[in-house]
Amino acid sequence: MINRLVILGATGDLSARFLLPALVALRSAGNLGDGFRLTGASREDWDGARYREWVTAQIERHGGHYPADTKAAVADAADYRRADVTNPAHVAAVVAGDDPVAVYLALPPALFPVVVTALHEAGLPPGSRVVLEKPFGANLSDARELNRLLAELVPEQAVFRVDHFLAMTTVQNVLGSRLANRVLEPLWNSTHIAEVDIVWDETLALEGRAGYYDTVGALKDMVQNHLLQLLCLVAMEPPITLGERDLRDRKVDVLRSVRLLTEDDVLRCTRRARYLAGRIGDRDIPAYADEEGVDPDRRMETYAEVELELDSWRWSGTTFRLRTGKALRANRKEVAVRFRSVPHLPFGHSGEAHPNVLRFGLEPEDLTFDLTGIGAHTDTLAPLSLTARMEPPHLPAYGRLLLDVLNGDPALSIRGDEAEEAWRVLTPVLTAWEKDLVPLEEYPAGSDGPTPAW
């Protein structure tokens, strides 16, 4: 296990809200010992004492209800180096040492190529690992070039292209529900499943993230990585094991089977939109184009829909729909598996059968099965829902990911060819949207999005 973590971009939002609380959770669970060391590097003119003060404040704000000594242990393990992370000499000073180190690039993705190049020139101790957040590149050619640079730095198994969705309890439960229950797996194909909706709708608006979001947009921020990863877990063939090779091979198979959209398909099967001014609860939300830091001429989308089909024996004839949107009326974060209707109802005129839908809730984490049963009057049909609430996870998603990084288990990270295949799937959409072939619709903040929506 690696006992030294370096965070480049250590004073940013990612560190404060996710990485530091994850380290507290790992310490509380007994996964980090007294020998663990954290080095933060950023441009701020701080010393170690100032950084530890900041770490302590962020842990108190975001770190959860853990014992005070646990939180203090993480803060006490922290040190700081002022550095330009694009400067090889500065980077070399940060990573210097004989022991292997895990280097986490908590940075804007646009900086990844130059920082990886700086790491290569600086040199890493043998056995070190590199962690990158999504999105991995800005397009297919970017991803290929970044993969080439990483291959010159460390072996592929030492590269962790992390997506915290893969460590969420309910996402893991998609595999558990499929592969550990005889009642489901025989039905898990196009003969029985008509549609799969993979949805991440949120009431959150831009929330001060214009510097990142206005250069990326909904399609790259959510669909290209998070939602395609969920597609892989839903549609993959059963792997022999859940080891990194078997699991990631099957995910790549899914992406390779996605039928590429033609230009006409993009016009018919995709939508994009951005929010106007509106109200969500007690909050007045300005129009996206008026948010601070937004360049309205970029015409960046805050809502994206993509409809895909898979050319495979199991899934030919099933529609997979991926959708995400910001500043919507309600949060809807789920994978909804919609089964086909039964071929015959022997109930006369007692009503219609309600569609069977298996819903994997992502936030909150629960499992719901919508069925049809007999109503209060025995001659009528009525909807019936069975709901199971997931047990709280032992570790938060980022805690699980960091533990895998430190232990050297890449099963839940994204392999290089997988990252490239994900970009291949969406390249026709990106190309058509950049040409403005698909209109940029608008919807009021606090609404259900552009209508009609599925």
Image (cartoon, grey):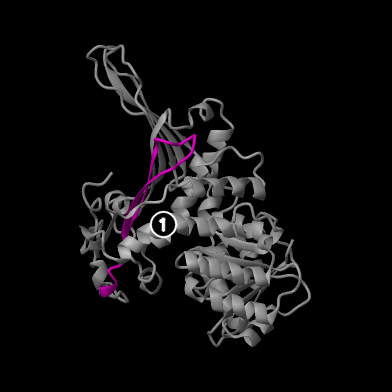
Tag 1 secondary structure = helix
Point out residue 72 in the picture as x, y percentages from the top left corner. Answer: 63, 68
Above or below — where is 373 with respect to 306? above
Above or below — where is 173 with respect to 433? above
Question: Considering the image in quadrants, where does the C terminus appear?
Answer: top left
- What is the span of residues highlighted in magenta in the rendered image? 297-326
Q: Is residue 318 magenta?
A: yes
Q: Say which residue label 1 marks.
A: 426
Q: In the displayed image of the protein, which residue is found farthest to the right?
A: 98
Q: Nearer the viewer, residue 233 or 18?
A: 233
Query: Callout 1, which amino acid?
Result: Leu
Q: Quadrant of residue 161?
A: bottom right
Q: How many labels sit on residues? A: 1
> Quick check: 208 left or right of 349?
right
Point out residue 240 in the picture as x, y percentages from the top left corner. Answer: 66, 39
Q: Nearer the viewer, residue 207 or 158?
A: 158
- Asked if residue 65 shows in the view, the reply is no
Q: Residue at x 49, y 35 (%)?
A: 313
Q: Nearer the viewer, residue 84 or 278?
A: 84
Question: Considering the image in quadrants, where does the N terminus appear?
Answer: bottom right
Q: Residue at x 66, y 41 (%)?
A: 241
